[in-house]
Image (cartoon, rainbow, N blue to C red):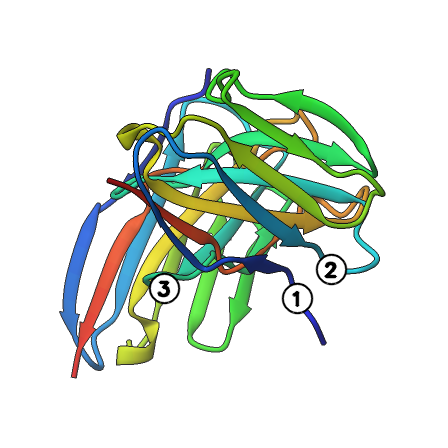
Amino acid sequence: TQLLEQSPQFLSIQEGENLTVYCNSSSVFSSLQWYRQEPGEGPVLLVTVVTGGEVKKLKRLTFQFGDARKDSSLHITAAQPGDTGLYLCAPNSGGSNYKLTFGKGTLLTVNP
Amino acid sequence: DTGVSQDPRHKITKRGQNVTFRCDPISEHNRLYWYRQTLGQGPEFLTYFQNEAQLEKSRLLSDRFSAERPKGSFSTLEIQRTEQGDSAMYLCASSLTGSKLEQFFGPGTRLTVL
């Protein structure tokens, strides 16, 4: 069973600040997805990363997949209150090709 | 564009009662998943269908839980003799085969067992 850690668990910042959240494991992933979840709603897919070292940008969000494909990071530039939510990473270790294993997430609050 | 829908959005029940939840996936998606999420945790896998076949059930899914997808379209999740520990958000997701595990989630059903 892979151990999946997301850090920090909680993050509260002011509008306009930059931040980075992390997803780490001892296992190698074949791909990894990031989701954002708002209170009382289901997770919304943000991005899928597949190749080691890959960087993907989605407006003010930058996603990086580690070279060894064991970790990933999400960087948000100039955070806005609308970025508030629970950020979840869900890697695929390749052993099963259908179910997602989620971390506990990072709960981000962006204050106006 | 219709995404994944779930019904009801909220359910409050008394301990010992049975409840049933429904999920309607994105129409062309042949895979359907159920997850459970408790406070402070990420979603945990419960079960998975490819078309109408239930291909895996988690150990989290006790024999009080049953899921069906009779025609390979919508799915139901039934919990019999509910317990307070069943209180959680029940999430449904769907995907296409070979889609890099890109699953699209519904809004969830929040179950509270009193």
Q: Are marks 1 and 2 in contact (CB under 8 Å)?
A: yes
User: What crowding class fits label 2: few (fewer than 14 Cα within 10 Å), some (14-19), or many (20 or more)?
Assistant: many
The residue that label 1 is drawn on is B3
> x, y percentage for residue B27?
80, 60
Whole-angstrom CA distance, mark 2 to mark 3, is: 21 Å
Reading the chain from its start, which is encountered first: label 1 or label 2? 1
Residue B103 is at least partly visible in this image:
no
The residue that label 2 is drawn on is B26
Kind of residue at badge 3: Glu
What is the quadrant of residue A102 in the picture?
A: top left
Whole-angstrom CA distance, mark 1 to mark 2, is: 5 Å
Q: Is residue A18 left or right of residue B107?
A: left
Residue B46 is at least partly visible in this image:
yes
Secondary structure beneath label 3: loop
User: What crowding class fits label 3: few (fewer than 14 Cα within 10 Å), some (14-19), or many (20 or more)?
Assistant: some
Kind of residue at badge 1: Gly
Q: Is residue B104 left or right of residue A109?
A: right
Whole-angstrom CA distance, mark 1 to mark 3, is: 16 Å
Secondary structure beneath label 1: loop
Q: Chain of mark 3?
A: A
Kind of residue at badge 2: Ile
